[in-house]
Amino acid sequence: ADLNPFYDRVENLYEIQGTPSDTKSQLIHKLKSALGLDAILCPHPQKYFKSPNAEYLELIESSIASGGYNAPGIQIQHNAVVTHLSLNSNVERAEGVHYVDRLTMTPQAVTAKCVLLCASTLESTRILQASKNLANSDRAVSGHGLGHYLMTHLKGAALSTPFTEEAYIRKPEELIYCHNQEALHGEGDKCRGWGLQIRIKESLDKIKVNTFGEDLPYFENQALVDFVALDKFGRPKLNIHYQYREHEIQMLEAQISHLKKVAEKLELGDFKINSELQAPGKNNHELGTARMGRTPENSCLNPFNQVWGYKNLYLTDGAAFTTSGYQNPTLTILALTWRACEHIKEQFEF
């Protein structure tokens, strides 16, 4: 409920919409009637996929050039590899950002009234840990989860046909989403969510069904900096440790069982099911490591994504997540960022 208004704003900004084709409408009806699945077409951002054959980089650059992000006066510093933040714990403020020019390898710095960190989960947590005051002096933050509780969506179980690959071209408008399958896995506290993502071309013999599942946050799954091992920019490297546990194995088994039912109900004559978990990180959905919370005793960020102890330092990417959920995280990251920006406007004058 708290994020709903910001989801709406983001969806309006990106013109997220879609209408299923006849083939997809028939499949959605079949999934609902034969399997009782709440199947919906996943709408896509019309504004940024009007030219589906264009490269993503071209789309981003053209969007910025045309003012698509509605940010007049913004200055983008290219080739800036951030090393750490300037933090002043005495006044509870971030003073600026240090970076290395990738082309000249010279150190640079900028000062700021407010710092908003959204560098992606692993990079944001590395920057925070590499910022001396936060990593060394303010040990309380490190003890409250910084670098820990790393998550990455459970992925592996998948259904396909012999004709899938020749037709399977990844385009956002093809996606059918069957969500909220927690009833098929576990009970009580062990009842967690997972969903199906389905792509189909022309007919059922050209179908791809992927599963996404909610892996749980474990303290031992971590990404911690090594101040001895440095990269060529002088930044500490990350030591990443991640392990699937009993919950994830049980969810995989439930997904495989359900995919067999899907194949049976859709009357797929010839199909194969992948039954192995993919390597962690395969989804590019790293989450956690700087979690949000209500008190500094159990979290790194407050409910408005401010870093505890630093009034003008915000973190809004996937590192803030307390659970992975089973949905793609991008829309939530955008909603959290918009919400944090509204809070920044209230707190600071620009």
Image: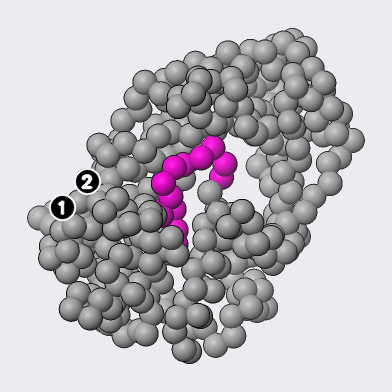
Dominant SS in magenta: loop
Residue 18 location in percent, x, y? 80, 50
Q: Where does residue 162 sit, x and y in percent of width and height?
A: 67, 19
Is there any visible trace of residue 201 in the rendered image? yes
Whole-Å distance between the Cαs marked 1 and 2?
7 Å
Graded by Cα atoms within 10 Å as few (under 14), some (14 to 19) or many (20 or more), the crowding at tag 2 reads few
The amino acid sitting under disc 1 is Asp
Residue extending farthest to the right is 22
Magenta residues (range): 315-328
Give x and y (percent) for residue 277. 44, 25
Q: Which residue in the structure is indicated by mark 2?
A: 239
Q: Is residue 235 left or right of residue 339?
A: left
Q: Position of residue 146 (x, y in %)?
A: 27, 53
Image disc number at residue 226: 1
Q: Are marks 1 and 2 in contact (CB under 8 Å)?
A: yes
The colour scheme used to paint the residues is one colour
User: The disc labelled 2 sits on which kind of residue?
Assistant: Asn
Q: Is residue 179 above or below residue 101?
A: above
At x 33% / y 57%, what residue is drawn? 295
Is 225 magenta? The answer is: no
The residue sitting at 20% across, 65% down in the picture is 134
The quarter of the displayed image where residue 326 is located: top right
Please, is residue 232 above or below residue 276 in the view? below
User: Do we see residue 123 in this rendering?
Assistant: no
